[in-house]
Image: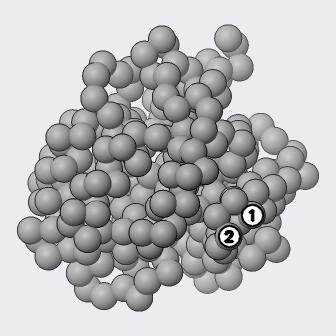
């Protein structure tokens, strides 16, 4: 069963540069709306049914604990946090901040509280480098070290992975198998491999942006809107410019 999966980043208020930040009030409307439709947030450790949905958060920002966790707890939703292993409890200097997007990453204690509440911690690599510019050995090290660090920190298996910048390269699948990852999360417009070509389970996600309303989420979940796919492709294409920009500054 392919469980509908939504991908978030920041859940915070205030002025932000970019489209990945969803306000706390809008996030609450998202979760309450999904709950009204009878949906229930699960992780890959849970057994899915027809009402299941996966809510995921990339990068592992502290505002997830502050603003998303209480809402999800209130509605009985569990979620998955893809944490950067080398950015625990420190600021996001890996990103282009524009003096506006400066965020603190989750601390060890916050990650442990997620685990205690039944949330899943997945790997997002160590330091958010695009794999398109790395050698095989560098990708292998990033995926292996991040998995080991997170498992040692939370005392639980880390078997889900999503690539930095959602930048997939073919070697990721082979490396994931060797390192005993069970799941790779992909943005749906970027899926380039069928499940029968790898032993690793591919889970397709739909990105959620600052302007998305509950009706947009339902369209993403039902996967019937070409416009939503087109929108995500365009936004992802534009966001890839940050990779080159980061190298220049």
Disc 1 and disc 2 in contact, CB within 8 angstroms: yes
In x, y percent, where is residue 50? Answer: 26, 85
Q: Is residue 239 visible?
A: yes
Question: For the residue carrying disc 2, how many other residues have a C-alpha within 10 Å: few (<14), some (14-19), or many (20+)?
Answer: few
Q: Residue at x 42, y 58 (%)?
A: 56
Q: Residue at x 32, y 34 (%)?
A: 12
**Could you tell me which quadrant the N terminus lies in?**
bottom left
Q: Is residue 167 visible?
A: no
The image quarter containing residue 118 is: bottom left
Secondary structure of the residue carrying tag 1 is helix
Please give left or right for residue 9 compared with residue 208 in the image: right
Please give left or right for residue 58 compared with residue 159 in the image: left
Real-space Cα separation, disc 1 to disc 2, in angstroms? 5 Å
In x, y percent, where is residue 11? Answer: 34, 40
How is this picture coloured? one colour
Numbered label tally: 2
Q: Residue at x 42, y 16 (%)?
A: 100
Q: Nearer the viewer, residue 44 or 206?
A: 44
User: What residue sits right under mark 1 in the picture?
Assistant: 152
Please give left or right for residue 211 compared with residue 94 in the image: left
Does 59 appear above or below 241?
A: below
Residue 155 marker: 2
Q: Residue at x 62, y 18 (%)?
A: 245
In x, y percent, where is residue 83? Answer: 59, 51
């Amino acid at each position: 069963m392919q469980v509908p999966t939504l991908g978030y980043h920041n859940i915070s208020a205030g002025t932000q540069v970019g489209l990945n930040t969803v306000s706390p009030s809008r996030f609450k409307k998202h979760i309450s709306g999904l709950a009204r439709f009878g949906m229930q947030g699960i992780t890959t450790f849970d057994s899915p049914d027809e009402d299941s949905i996966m809510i995921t958060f990339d990068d592992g920002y502290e505002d997830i604990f502050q603003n998303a966790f209480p809402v999800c707890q209130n509605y009985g939703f569990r979620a998955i946090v893809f944490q950067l292993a080398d950015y625990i409890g420190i600021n996001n200097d890996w990103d282009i901040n524009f003096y506006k997007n400066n965020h603190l990453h989750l601390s060890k204690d916050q990650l442990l509280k997620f685990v205690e509440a039944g949330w899943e911690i997945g790997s997002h690599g160590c330091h958010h480098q695009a794999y398109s510019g790395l050698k095989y050995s560098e990708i292998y090290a990033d995926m292996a070290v991040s998995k080991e660090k997170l498992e040692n920190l939370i005392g639980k298996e880390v078997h889900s992975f999503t690539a930095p910048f959602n930048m997939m390269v073919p070697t990721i699948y082979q490396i994931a198998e060797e390192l005993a990852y069970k799941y790779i999360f992909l943005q749906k417009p970027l899926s380039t491999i069928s499940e029968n070509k790898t032993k690793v389970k591919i889970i397709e996600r739909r990105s959620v942006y600052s302007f998305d309303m509950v009706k947009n989420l339902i369209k993403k979940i039902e996967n019937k809107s070409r416009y939503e796919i087109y929108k995500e492709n365009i936004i992802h294409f534009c966001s890839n410019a940050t990779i080159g920009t980061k190298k220049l500054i």
